[in-house]
Amino acid sequence: MTTTTALTNIGTLVTNDPSLGWGSPRSSKFEHGGCSPLGLIQDAALVIDGDRIAWVGESSKAPATDNAVDAGGRAVIPGFVDSHSHLVFAGDRTAEFNARMSGRSYSAGGIRTTVAATRAASDEELSANVEKYLREALRQGTTTLETKSGYGLTVDDEARALRIAASHTDEVTYLGAHIVPPEQADDPAAYVALVTGAMLDACAPHARWIDVFCERGAFDGDQARAILTAGRAKGLHPRIHANQLSYGPGVQLAVEIDAASADHCTHLTDADVTALASGNTVATLLPGAEFSTRAAWPDARRLLDAGATVALSTDCNPGSSFTSSMPFCIALAVRDMGMTPDEAIWSATAGGAAALRRTDVGRLTPGSRADLALLDAPSPVHLAYRPGVPLVSAVWQRGERAL
């Protein structure tokens, strides 16, 4: 028999189900009319039963439980769903960042520095790094996190990266097609054959997803199609790094093959936006990368107005976005990408879940996983209103107090 716990006296509860909160037929509280995408409930409570949410509603109507926690009028949100990161790495790229901030432009080539350091690291060092950054993300409210290989680029190194990643998270992505490694730079076709052949065979048992960096200096559209098609034949679901540094075929390819997400989406044509709005592929935006490379910001407003589904993620990696903070990405999205606070919070929770094709996380509704963060603030808007302030005061993951 499981133990039940109620969180009561919640100032504002984000459910991500508009039928449960402001703007629904049950309530006239939404002060501006219409329907908040966050499904906000004020003076709220929720009940955790085992690892699931059993009930949400007004605090005065909360059922009896074994335990109770008084939220003290603070806000509760779903745990963040970070659907794009690169945590299996070793080494440091401070010098590259310093040079970039001093005027040098960003290119995909810096990945090679991390590849060399990662190949030289032990399994124990790599695993400790993953654990370190997962814990860092948890302290900032992230309860579901995808991570990738891509810094090994040999059969053995990619397979061990995925084994290590899978020991820490369920959302693991094979990214053998990150770049062509230096030793095969003169024969990229041979490397694509390796990625779709022996490397894929070794890596597929440890991953759920397959990804490719479709970009000038990495892999072109035809190569990306071959890689993702081969992965899908092995049971891996496609996602793609698309249109980060320049216009290209990545977004159109993603929608065509029903990839779960097209990530970056910085340089989009009208046709790209239309494709994302009409398909099932989520546009995952990674503002940490633009912040760290001084690149143009993705136009979230354009995507949202067209009807596309948008996710926010950190892209945590040692080269172009060395942050694990989803609150930081929310603040950037609101300040520089045209998103409202509600839209950014939704995209960092339910949007991330959509990018992973998950319905059990990213929301706080009966039956969903009990992953949630208690903020030291009365409203989730404070995540953008108070940038840089550590507002997450407690985290529950799978129903257990994790922080």
Image (spheres, helix red, strand yellow):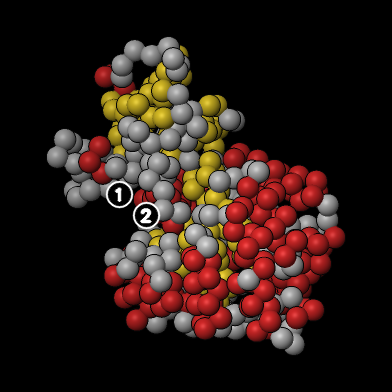
Q: In what quadrant of the picture does the N terminus appear?
A: top left
Mark 2: amino acid: Glu
Q: Count residues near mark 2 (Cα–Cα under 10 Å), then give few for <14, some for 14-19, many for 20+.
A: many
Please state if 61 lies on the left or on the right of 243 as rendered.
Answer: left
Mark 1: amino acid: Pro
Q: Secondary structure at mark 1?
A: loop
**How far across and down, in percent of the image, does residue 325 sit?**
58, 50
Q: Is residue 148 above or below residue 392?
A: below
Q: Secondary structure at mark 2?
A: helix
**How far across and down, in percent of the image, does residue 65 sit?**
38, 14
What residue sits 38% from the left and 29% below the top? 53
The residue that disc 2 covers is: 343
Q: Is residue 40 visible?
A: yes
The residue that disc 1 covers is: 37
Q: Mark 2 vs mark 1: which is more N-terminal?
A: 1
Whether pointer 2 and pointer 1 mark residues with C-beta atoms closer than 8 Å, the reply is: yes
Q: Nearer the viewer, residue 127 or 286?
A: 127
**Residue 290 quadrant:** bottom right
Q: Residue pushed farthest left?
A: 25
Kindly report the distance in space between the C-alpha atoms of the residues bearing marks 2 and 1: 7 Å
What residue sits 74% from the left and 46% below the top? 127
